[in-house]
Every structure is written in C-alpha cells, then in structure tokens.
Amino acid sequence: QRYVSYTIEAQSWCCGNTRIVIHQTSWHSSFPFFEMPVPIRLFGTNNQTHDVVLNHTFDGQSFIVPVPFTITNVVFDPEKNIISRNNSARLSHEKFDYSKEIAVYPNPATSVLTVETSSFVAFEKGIIYNALGQVTGTFSSPSTSVTHLESGVYTVKITTNAGTFHKKFIKK
C-alpha cells in the first residue's frame, strides 16, 4: 500500500501562540513529498477546541499559530480526511526557548552584523565583546558596522524584551 505518515508536535509558546512542527514520511524513499493542507485540532483545559489548517510544503515545517488558550492536547486530521497511516500527534512540554528566536548574521561577518529576532522578541540593544571579555562596540539598532573589529571570535550580548542572550560570531 502507498501512504504517508505524519508526526505532529505542538508546543505552547509565549503571548498566546502555539508552535506546530509537521513531519511527513512516505511508504518508500522514492515516493516524493506530498504538499497539502493539514488539519489539526488543539484542545484546552476547559474543553476548548481550536481548529487550524496548515499549508504543509516541506518536511519539518514549523508554524506559529495564535491560540486563545493554553493547549493540553493535539489531534492530527480530526475528521479523518487525509489518506495516511501510523500518524502521531503529541504535545511537547519543553519550555519555550527564546534564544532560538534570535540569530546573528552573516556569520562570519565582514562589514555589518545583523541581529534578527522573531515577532515575539523585540531587540533593544547589543554589546560586542572580544575573546578577553572587553567591550569592543555597542549598538541600539538591529544592524551595526563591524569594520573596526579585527579578525576573530566575538560574543554579542543581546538585550531584548524577553531577557538577555549571548551569541557568538566570527569577524573575517
């Protein structure tokens, strides 16, 4: 038989949002990925339900969806409209990790370093430290010049509305 299997993982995030990751595997490695809308039902502590349909276009795709309650369970394809088998859906109890919502690029950097944050995290300021822990620059907008830095490994201390985070980057 030819079929695909889905693995769904849902995780409560901050600010009334839920992160949903969808994986798809097929019955055989020669069978291509099948793009399609994927229906998911989320449940809350007071018997609330919230249905979403996510446009799944690649394996491991992650979606952030607003949900008006804390989720307690997740169900894949609640109306059983998708031809599939051996599916699983689980609620992740991992803590929301804000540091995954912050990236510095390009890395290695030559002239400009940019701090990118998700819509959940607001950049406030950055401080660049060299390998000896000395401050080599500060900036208050998400992009800053690094032309004054010598080649090497640096740490940028990023202050956001969600706390302070440290990321390393290389200056070429």
Image (cartoon, helix red, strand yellow):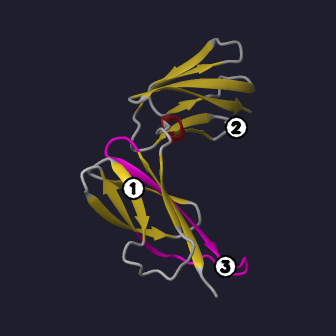
Q: Is residue 117 above or below residue 25?
A: above
Quadrant location, the C terminus:
top right
Q: Is residue 14 left or right of residue 129?
A: left
What element does badge 2 sit on? Answer: loop
Label 3 CA crowd tier, 10 Å (few <14, some 14–19, many 20+): few
In the image, which is nearer the foreground, mark 2 or mark 1?
1
The foreground one among 117 and 141 is 117
Displayed quadrant of residue 157? top right
What element does badge 1 sit on? Answer: strand
> Residue 164: x and y, percent?
48, 24
Measured Cα–Cα span from mark 3 to mark 1: 27 Å
The stretch in magenta equals: 13-39
Q: Amino acid at mark 2?
A: Pro
In the image, which is nearer the foreground, mark 3 or mark 2?
3
Measured Cα–Cα span from mark 3 to mark 2: 40 Å
- Tag 1 residue: 73
The foreground one among 135 and 1 is 1
Q: Is residue 18 above or below residue 129?
A: below
Q: Earlier in the sequence, mark 2 or mark 1?
A: 1
Label 2 CA crowd tier, 10 Å (few <14, some 14–19, many 20+): some
Q: Which mark identifies residue 92? A: none
> Residue 21: x and y, percent?
51, 58
In the image, which is nearer the foreground, mark 3 or mark 1?
1
Q: How many numbered discs sit on the rendered protein?
A: 3
Q: Amino acid at mark 1?
A: Asn
Q: Amino acid at mark 3?
A: Trp
Quadrant location, the N terminus:
bottom right
- Tag 3 residue: 27
- Tag 2 residue: 108
> Residue 151: x and y, percent?
75, 26
